[in-house]
Every structure is written in C-alpha cells, then in structure tokens.
Image: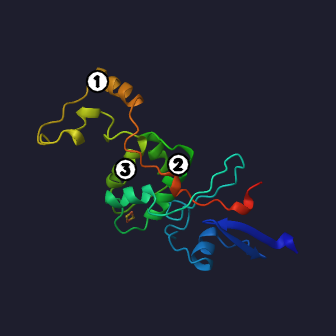
Amino acid sequence: DSSNLLVFFVNGRKVTVANPDPEMTVLHFLRYKLRLTGTKLACGEGGCGACTVMYSRYDHHNDTINVRTKLHPIQRQLAENHGSQCGFCTPGIVMSVYALLRNHPRPTKQQIYEALDGNLCRCTGYRPILDGLYPFTGCKTQCGLGDSCCQSRKGDLDLEPEMPTRETFSLEKERRGACPDEPLLYDPTQELVFPPQLKRH
Ligand code: FES
C-alpha cells in the first residue's frame, strides 16, 4: 500500500520509509536512522536552534545540479574566525545561515542577525560568529564605516576611534551601496545536490 510510504531526500539521497511512525521527530530520524549526527539535540523544545535543518521543495524553473567538493564557505568562515568552540551550536548556525544565503546571497547585517535569532551559543559570545559572517554582506569592513572602522585602522588601535558624524555615516552608507563584490565568499558549487529524480524533464 503506497499510501503508507514516505519518500523524501536527505542530502541528495533518496529515503523511503514504510509505515512511518508519526511520533518520530526529524531529529531522531536523522541521528538514529540515518546516523547524521551533525544535527544536535540540545534544548529539545525548539528554542536554541542546534537541531536546525533546511528543507526545500523542487523549483522546476531552476535547473542546476551542483556538487560539494570542500567546506562550504559558511563552515570555512566560522572555522577561520574561531566561531566554533564546543561546536554544539555550530551545525544549527550553519544551517540557518545557509538557508539565509539561499534566499539572499548578499544579505544585510540585519538579515544575518534575524537569521540567527533562533540559535543560541553558550561559548563564543557571538562576536567571532558574526565577524565570520559579515563578509557575506559583500563589504570588507565589519561595521559599515569604511576607513573609519576601527578594524581597518591598523597601527593606531590605541587611539580612540573617531566617532562618525551623521554626514560621514550617510556617505559611507552610499559607498556601501556601490560596494565591490569582494570578498565573494558564496560559492554556488557548494549547493546541496537536488535530487535529479524530482526534476521534470
Ligand atoms: Fe559552544 Fe556555540 S560553540 S555553544
């Protein structure tokens, strides 16, 4: 009886479950049936984001299938900026930002904050996580103040950073509007494989 058959894809792999247990959570299925333990059980009530997964439906207008060959830029940015300590929150944070970048490849800082609204981290204080993610906005400086940013004032870090005036701040906002495409971190070849079986030909 095919009505009791649940068919879906996980990381591009087809999964078929006969007579699925309606009380089994996605988290339990991923961890204990598929042995995908990157998805964590932490608060157990949807408050901390450690169990975040991304689900999607096939958009038949989009006809690209890509391969994964290395760390996704989100993973690399978190690793290189020390955005992971005990690592328990990291898979959930990666998935939240991954879903954000799928919808907004060049997000604003505000969109990054909102994407992480449901993810708790007990270790890092969030600063290194955010520092690693800011480059996805497309600007090199971290606070949007360009050369006035204390992060780009090498050699005079002991000086009080100059406070931006309303004028310099709006000038900088204009400049950010024309911000060059660097560093371009989002690499579409790192997209998850979309199951070819679901595509219309
Ligand atoms: Fe430990 Fe975030 S790195 S909870």
Q: Is residue 118 left or right of residue 150?
A: right
Q: Residue at x 32, y 59 (%)?
A: 80
Spatial CA distance of label 1 from label 3 is 24 Å
In the rendered image, residue 42, in percent from the top left (x then y), is placed at: 49, 69
Q: Quadrant of the N terminus?
A: bottom right
Q: Are marks 1 and 2 in contact (CB under 8 Å)?
A: no
User: Which mark is drawn over residue 100?
Assistant: 2
| Comes first in the chain, label 3 or label 2 | 2
* Crowdedness near tag 3: few (<14), some (14–19) or many (≥20) residues, C-alpha within 10 Å: some
Depth order, front residue of 77/71: 71
Q: Quadrant of the C terminus?
A: bottom right
Residue drawn at x 33%, y 41% as measured from the top left: 140
Q: Which residue lies most toward the top here?
A: 167
Image point 38% across, 25% down: which residue?
174
The kind of residue tagged 3 is: Leu
- Asked which secondary structure carries label 1, the reply is helix
Q: Position of residue 124 (x, y in %)?
A: 33, 59
Q: Position of residue 79 (x, y in %)?
A: 35, 61
Q: Label 3 belongs to which residue? A: 130
At label 2, which amino acid type do we have? Leu
Q: Residue furthest front?
A: 201
Label 3: element kind: helix
Q: Position of residue 129 (x, y in %)?
A: 36, 54
Mark-to-mark CA distance, 3 and 2: 14 Å
- Relative to 152, 95 lies left or right: right
The tag on residue 168 is 1
* Dot 1 and dot 3 residues touching (CB under 8 Å): no
- Residue 158 vertical position relative to residue 121 in the rendered view, above or below: above
Crowd band around label 2 with a 10 angstrom C-alpha radius: few (<14), some (14–19), many (20+): some
Closer to the N terminus: mark 1 or mark 2? 2
